Amino acid sequence: MRNKTIGIIGTGNVGHALAVRLIATGYTVKVANSRGPHTLIAFENTTKAKAVPLSAVAADADMLIIAIPFGKIRELTSTLHLPEKVVVVDTGNYYPERDGTIAEIEEGMPETQWVSAQLGVPVVKAFNNIMASSLASNWKPAGIKNRIALPVAGDDQLARNEVKALVEELGFTAYDAGDLSDSWRQQPGEPAYCTDPSLSELLLLLARANRKKAMANRDKAAKLMARIPPTFTGQQLVRASRLSAGLDIWQPKSWAAMLQLIWTILRA
Ligand SMILES: NC(=O)c1ccc[n+]([C@@H]2O[C@H](COP(=O)([O-])OP(=O)(O)OC[C@H]3O[C@@H](n4cnc5c(N)ncnc54)[C@H](OP(=O)(O)O)[C@@H]3O)[C@@H](O)[C@H]2O)c1
């Protein structure tokens, strides 16, 4: 896919991390937010991405990555023009407290199936279970031990393959997580969320996800995340998440991160 163009909607934590990595990997990147390119001059300067209006971000793009708060996705439908062959990727997570209640998801529809229904095109779910800070900094070339593995789920096999290839190029091991029906396994509150797992760990964690408890787990995770101040770093959160998923139980740094997380939340 190198020398191809990727559009990103959203220039926050995830959009910035992806833009930097994509450009370093050789892609041309266009970005858009809701307020227009004139608000993205600093973003253009730091990333070398090209800011464009939302209506133009998908034009001529081979892939379009959506990295905006989940509840705002409905706002895209009136402005976004999707070319027929563009592969659409959803990085989002649904947090009802932040995004408003979405009845279909509460009734059991996997999050990205809902995104696909809003946009009227197949959508691939990827990058939703890794912290933006890990996306930016914890990538590794193929073959290096303990490379982070990321699940890629989607109903269109060809689109899923393209996103898997991109994940590998960006420095992560791509795991084919099948169609969207099982993609709840990679959502917030499940063991594979924000744990920077190796491939063998990822398989174990996805298998441990609990469908019956998924919504309650997601809501617990959302409440917890809302109480964590920005001073708590992404890497501390990954360490605490790994410990609570049963990984690294003999690592003093993990216990230190967990104790610090508990202390931070109690003080918040
Ligand atoms: N933060 C993480 O580490 C992380 C990791 C994995 C997944 N996620 C998920 O990824 C999604 C994005 O998270 P984030 O942390 O990157 O968010 P963020 O830092 O809050 O950035 C959101 C971006 O979306 C833009 N935006 C908001 N409404 C928009 C609209 N209607 N049209 C176009 N752009 C719009 C915002 O710009 P304007 O307001 O200027 O339009 C901003 O650039 C969320 O669903 C989140 O749960 C986050």
Image (cartoon, rainbow, N blue to C red):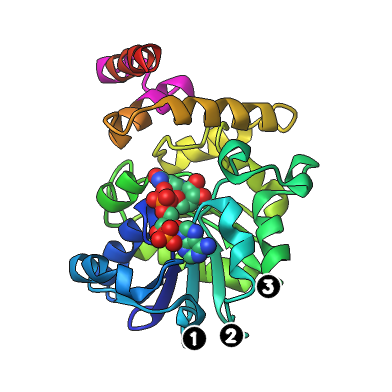
Secondary structure category for the residue under label 1: loop
Q: Are marks 3 and 1 in contact (CB under 8 Å)?
A: no
For marks 3 and 1, give the one nearer the viewer. Answer: 1
Cβ atoms at labels 1 and 2 below 8 Å apart: yes
Q: Disc 1 marks which residue?
A: 59
Work out which quarter of the rendered image holds the N terminus and state it.
bottom left
Residue pictured at 38% horizontal, 72% vertical: 31
Amino acid type, residue under disc 1 in the picture:
Ala
Q: Is residue 240 above or below residue 28?
A: above
Mark closest to the chain's N terminus, 1 or 2 = 1
* Residue at numbered disc 3: 121
Could you tell which of marks 2 and 3 lies nearer the N-terminus?
2
Q: Are marks 2 and 3 in contact (CB under 8 Å)?
A: no
Comparing 260 with 203, the one in front is: 260
Q: Quadrant of ligand 1?
A: bottom left
Please, what is the three-letter code of the amino acid marked with disc 3? Val
Task: Give the mark nearest the N terminus, 3 or 1.
Answer: 1
Viewer-proximal residue among 3 and 38 = 38
Q: Residue furthest bottom?
A: 60
Judge whether residue 251 is colored magenta. yes
- Residue numbers of the magenta segment: 240-255
Quarter of the image where the C terminus is located? top left
Q: Which mark is residue 83?
A: 2
Residue 79, percent across and down?
A: 58, 76
SS type, badge 2: loop
Residue flagged by tag 2: what amino acid is it?
Answer: Pro
Note whether 113 is above or below 81 in the view shown.
Answer: above
Residue lying at 48% horizontally and 44% vertically, measured from the top left: 129
In the image, is 59 to the left or to the right of 134? right
